Image: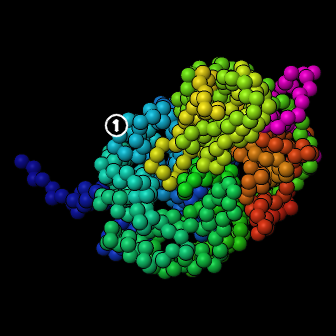
Amino acid sequence: MAHKKPPCLVSLLLPLLTLLLPQADARSFAVDWEHDRFLLDGVPFRYVSGSLHYFRVPRVLWADRLFKMRLSGLNAVQLYVPWNYHEPQPGVYNFNGSRDLLAFLNEAAVANLLVILRPGPYICAEWEMGGLPSWLLRKPKIHLRTSDPDFLAAVDSWFNVLLPKIYPFLYHNGGNIISIQVENEYGSYKACDVSYMGHLAGLFRALLGDEIVLFTTDGPEGLKCGSLPELYTTVDFGPVDNMTKIFGMLRKYEPHGPLVNSEYYTGWLDYWGHNHSTQSIPAVTKGLENMLKLGASVNMYMFHGGTNFGYWNGADEKGHFLPITTSYDYDAPISEAGDPTPKLFALRNVISKFQEIPLGPFPPPSPKMALGPLTLHLDGDLLTFLDALCPQGPIHSVLPMTFEAVKQDHGFVLYRTYLPYTLLEPTPFWVPNNGVHDRAYVMVDGVFRGVLERNMKHKLFLMGKIGTQLDILLENMGRLSFGSNHSDFKGLLEPPILGKTILTQWMMFPLKIDDLVKWWFPVQWRKGEQPTASSGPTFYSTTFPILGSVGDTFLYLPGWTKGQVWINGFNLGRYWTKQGPQQTLYVPRPLLFPKGAINKITLLELENVPTQLQIQFLDKPILNSTSHGTYSYPLSDTQSTYEPMELSGH
């Protein structure tokens, strides 16, 4: 019988080495509770991050903005995921073009930035309905951001699509997502539904596993209802707030672990009719340095703001309705046009005291272009194009229906009825219970008679013969993104009253204006007809070549009142020159066709036009129209080559 050889040392150690080697290579991001810090791959780590919203920046410019953030000394980027941007209709998903979230995560990885993801379902972000899809309101009695079964069913369906997509991008899976926020500032929402928050936490864990750090963010007064024991608690505050007091309040809910300010405000948002918001450089830099001295992790909101293209701006409710401007410049360290500002370099100096800054010169501002003035031509009033704007025809109802009821998410709906009797004298026309959401452009027999506005202007006086056509163009100025526990339905929420008569027998025309501009207007409409100039909702357009090099530019509309503007079929967003503070609209260079090609600009002016139908492209933005002066950044005169812009998405 042969004797067995004694096992050698290598064979004994091999199973042990097999167990240890994967652990040595394992990636991890975790909370070190004992030492009040984060650990990245087992090493003490602190993030200095900045917010950037991919949905406010054209896709071809993502890499540029992320690269500049990394050069500023940041090691992470924080971003929201707006549900309504990716699920425009129930069960219909869009992750293409400027909506390609996974492509953005890859661009962040190329820029060597970790990711802090905030998928909601509610995000605020000064974005249309806080990122919630407006089709939720097709069930009028739904209770948003609660345990309402209808809301939870929609949320579960959405996250069962989104979260598996991002699972491979989690840091421990080889990706760059180090932490994920559950909900957003829920403590500021009066519902305070603990079961709802618990449901979300369980759903995230079920779909993402136990390793990923899940957290909440709230203002100091919202920590009670916004936090959960099983989620890491963070806080948000700005330079003017008492850091010591607020971090002390945070410690009542999160006694151990790193201090985190998830939204340190570098500036602030703008409302139409208010001054442009700014935040001083000394205040911002001092606050950041004080937090970094404490060892805190900080995310700067915003580091680059971007633009509310199209109809995507949100609104606040602070005693009255406050829609947010098209520009989301935010007085951020990187301007709306992607240029470094003095604030950026001051913050970079602070960051360099605490961690290594990437070497190399900072890119100069992008080339800018001035052009014009250009004279626009009258295409015709909106009613002229009604058949093309609503090819399916109107919806009939005894009482007016909301945008949500006729499945119109954004933009405009035309309401039509007829005068029930002759008005020989000016007769009051109004909508009770503040029922205009948000602006109503009133026309009698095709003639513009004035505006009714939510919270502001409630009554007009009309005259006309029995049977005369009464048209009311309703504009959705953006659904509430913060400041209300009530659903923000759009359109005529109550039947209008003429004198003492409730008006009935309505036709609703949901308007597809973007389709008209993109597909019909490039063809000469109604050749041979010469429309007559008029006030009220009217289309104007012109074409122009760019003879020199193409650059970023800023569309200026002096004397125009309010409306929407498209360039080469792309919806730039709203202008409201008479209201301010924003006077110019940012036009990214890739949107414009280069030398030799014809560009087209189309305006829908809703009220009144200037004597001269002219517009200009400036090489500097004007974001503050008040007596405090204009607001602009230093710009470059250097030239650059053309890149085609990814137009899908906005």
Q: Residue at x 85, y 50 (%)?
A: 559
Element marked by disc 1: helix
Q: Residue lying furthest front in this view?
A: 425
- Residue flagged by tag 1: what amino acid is it? Pro
Which residue position is annotated with label 1? Answer: 149
Residue 9 % position (x, y): 23, 63
Residue closest to the eye, 554 or 270: 270
Say if residue 157 shows up in the picture. Answer: yes
Residue found 84% across the figure and 24% down from its top: 525
In the image, residue 643 above or below residue 67: above
Q: Residue at x 65, y 56 (%)?
A: 271
Question: How many marks can you see?
Answer: 1
Q: Is residue 640 visible?
A: no
Q: Is residue 535 magenta?
A: yes
Residue 563 location, quadrant:
top right
Q: Quadrant of residue 108?
A: bottom right
At x 78%, y 41%, the residue is: 607
Front residue of 616/438: it is: 438
Please give the range of residues in magenta: 520-548
> Is residue 381 highlighted in magenta?
no
Extreme residue toward the left, this view:
1
Tell me the chief SS of the magenta region. Answer: loop
